[in-house]
Image (cartoon, rainbow, N blue to C red):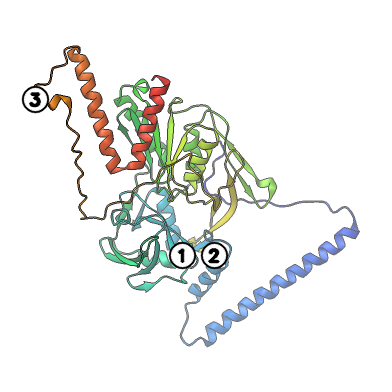
Amino acid sequence: MKKFIMAALGGTLAGTLLTTQIAGPLLAQEDARSTSVYEQLDLFGDVFERIRASYVEDVDERALIEAAINGMLQSLDPHSSFLPPAEAEDMREHTRGSFGGLGIEVTQKEGWVEVVSPMDGTPAFEAGIESGDIITHVDGENLFGLTLNEAVVLMRGPVGKEIIITVVRKDVDEPFDVSIIRDEIKLTAATVRAVGKTVVLRLTTFNDQTYPNMAEGLAKVVDEMGGMDNVEGFVLDLRNNPGGLVSSAIAIADAFLEEGEIMSTRGRDPEESERVNARPGDLTEGKPLVVLINGGSASSSEIVSGALQDHHRGIIVGVQSFGKGSVQSLMPLRGDGMMRLTTARYYTPSGRSIQALGISPDIVVVQPPRTPEGEEVEEVVDRFSRTEAELRGALDNDSLTEDQRAEIIAAQEAAEEAAKLRDEDFQLSYAVDLLKGLATISGQ
């Protein structure tokens, strides 16, 4: 399979001019265009020299050039940008799964910084930051008008140091401050656990470790459950997963598909279009699959969920995803910097682009809001919850053997555990119940 690792797409356009009557005007237009570009570059040089010579204070010439490059890239779309050497190294660390910060993936929206998703177990997640939150200030400093990189730099800092961010949240009347202690972010790309007879695969990001972590964890948990025959189905949890390496997304989708297209990319040049197909082999052996998504599921998460949805391999449950349908290439530059440039759009196997639309779930399930820390939840007691067995003088059931009685008790305990899960994670509980229903219908 061809490996997509955010590499630059390149190519040349070649052709033969049929007549000199066509070639003459075309060459003249090209010459005029080149002259205009050189004039604009001369204008840039003139402005740069005047700033350096006449600005009220001394200027950092390197910073001026970097700001000009970044401005040029960010004028294209919200995801193209220039990464100076320090930020380029942070990006390399991110794809390796370890970096410092708050633990949030952000983008820019109308001049403000918007949270794509908080990452599981990070300071931002624990502080209650949610997908869709707008961060307006960091330690009192207004972020409006800053580049995305500049805003991210303000949120970085020494591990263990407190930062105060001001948040605007939908359906909350006033902005509010959130205190977060910076920490080193070490992401576990994938975790696997059993919930009853369901195997839950939780992916937090797509990096070099995502597929190996998932495959190893899946094999271990299935073995602990006594083999695939004891598994009713799988839940692939992509909620609040902001994406990452396209190559990792392809590997994950391929893990559940026996054949067919996973995704395609289309760049500026039609000849550079690429299609990636699945190879034989399904880690789950065709067992029922439910995929969980929400507004924080973006980019690579949408590649995976879109492929599984188009092939009818999994039932998509949750709410509409983020809608980032473009591919960014990381291009090394001289001086150890990098350029992140949007080079293609990606499409699901059916040929649909999810750019600005997202993946629509097959079943919409909204997660109830988290209870604010320290707020007590009133426990509701069902006054009709007494059973026959609790009544004084109730008859014993003498038609069951001890083994049958133990089996019924075990089933009751499993149902009670499932009910507890609804309080902890309603969407996941729904997915587990759905798989249990599918298993019941199919007689497994």
Residue on which the image places disc 1: 148
In the picture, measured across the screen, residue 23 lies left or right of residue 241, that is: right
* Quadrant housing the N terminus: top right
Secondary structure under badge 3? loop
**Upstream in sequence: badge 2 or badge 1:** 2
Q: Which one is in front in this view, the residue at disc 3 or the one at disc 2?
A: 3
Secondary structure under badge 1? helix
The residue located at (32%, 27%) in the rendering is 197
Image position, residue 260 (x, y; %): 58, 32
Secondary structure under badge 2? helix
Amino acid bearing label 1:
Leu
Label 2 close to label 1 by CB (< 8 Å)? yes
Q: Mark 2: few, some, or many residues within 10 Å (few <14, many ≥20)?
A: some
Residue on which the image places disc 2: 74
Observer-nearest of 110 and 336 = 110
**Upstream in sequence: badge 3 or badge 2:** 2
Above or below: residue 285 compared with residue 81: above
Image position, residue 271 (x, y; %): 69, 46
Residue on which the image places disc 3: 392
